Amino acid sequence: MDKRELYLSLGSNQGDRSANLLQAVRKFDEGLKMPHSALSGLLAFPSWGFEGPEFLNCAVRYDLPDAGQDPVLHAYAILDLAKRIEAEMGREPEEPSPEGPRVYHDRPIDIDILLYGDLSMDEPRLTIPHKLMMYRCFVLVPLRQVASPRLRAQIPGIFA
């Protein structure tokens, strides 16, 4: 059976940051009904987009069976799972900024979908590949630790 690789980026800068990250990964494992395939180290990085405490970040890969489901619908189900886990772990919902750009803030957990198989989409709720991942060391460094040979071949420049 073919596999579809799912890559997530997780970060935390409130409370017990390492426990928050590991709890979020466990919850994702439970929600997907399978264990993760690879987990990076928990790495410290300065906050990005605002002044705040240092974040711990990690990346996780899931090798999901391709069961023939619509990848866009499945991506939205994964997004809903991520948002549910963030809410369960105490993340406050984001208020839209009337001025335009997103306002970043401290949070116990942040979960972003980076990549999902070969899916490319740009919708109001979800963009895959994540549109800022190539500009964020706190995403690329952990991603490098969990990248499969397939991903390394697809985007060789960031894994050299």
Image (cartoon, rainbow, N blue to C red):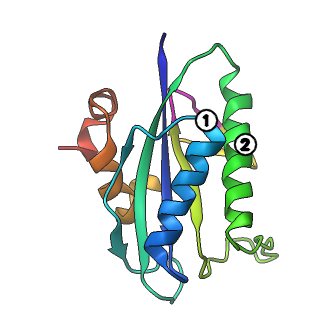
- Residue under the image location 74 percent in, 56 percent down: 84
Q: Is residue 48 left or right of residue 78?
A: left
Instruction: Please say whether residue 39 is one of the residues in the magenta stretch.
Output: no
- Which is more toward the observer, 150 or 60? 60
Q: Measured from the top left, where is residue 87 in percent x and y?
A: 74, 65
Query: Within 10 angstroms of label 1, few (less than 14), some, or many (20 or more) residues?
Result: few
Give residue 123's mark. Answer: 2
**How many numbered circles are shown?**
2
Cβ atoms under marks 1 and 2 closer than 8 Å: no
Identify the amino acid type marked 1.
Lys
- Residue under the image location 69 percent in, 31 percent down: 74
- The region drawn magenta spans 116-121
Alpha carbons under labels 1 and 2: distance apart: 27 Å
82 lies above or below 156: below
Please identify the quarter of the rendering in which residue 96 is found.
bottom right
Q: Earlier in the sequence, mark 1 or mark 2?
A: 1
Q: Is residue 138 left or right of residue 128?
A: left
- Which is more toward the observer, 131 or 108? 108
Q: Is residue 5 left or right of residue 128?
A: left
